[in-house]
Image (cartoon, helix red, strand yellow):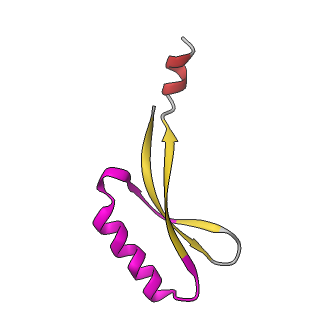
Amino acid sequence: MGCYYSILQGNYGYGWDDLATYPKEKATKELRRDYKDYQKNEPRYSHRIISRRVLNENSNLKLFK
């Protein structure tokens, strides 16, 4: 039905912005490294990692046929 992603986000005073997107199953080392780099290089801003599910475009068509 959908694909799962890990998203690295940063808050620069106007809400959370997506900085990088990683496939959920391949995200561990690269995601953690990038998160630490953002924390080190931008210490005055908040960063977080979230999970997001993106629905496949064709999955809705199958449900209504």
Picture quadrant where residue 40 is located = bottom left
Given the current orientation, which residue lies at the most extreme top position?
65
6 in the magenta segment: no
Above or below — where is 7 with respect to 52? below
What is the quadrant of the C terminus in the image? top right
Picture quadrant where residue 16 is located = bottom right
Give x and y (percent) for residue 35.
Answer: 42, 74
Q: Which residue sits at x=50%, y=50%? A: 52
Q: Main secondary structure of the magenta part?
A: helix
Q: How many numbered marks, from 0 up?
A: 0
Q: Which residue sits at x=60%, y=66%? A: 17
Above or below — where is 43 with respect to 52? below
Give x and y (percent) for residue 36.
Answer: 39, 79
Q: Which residue sits at x=53%, y=20%? A: 61
On the rendered structure, is 30 left or right of 38?
left
**Where are the magenta residues, as a range?**
19-46
Q: Nearer the viewer, residue 20 or 39?
A: 39
Give x and y (percent) for residue 18.
Answer: 54, 64
What is the quadrant of the N terminus in the image? top left
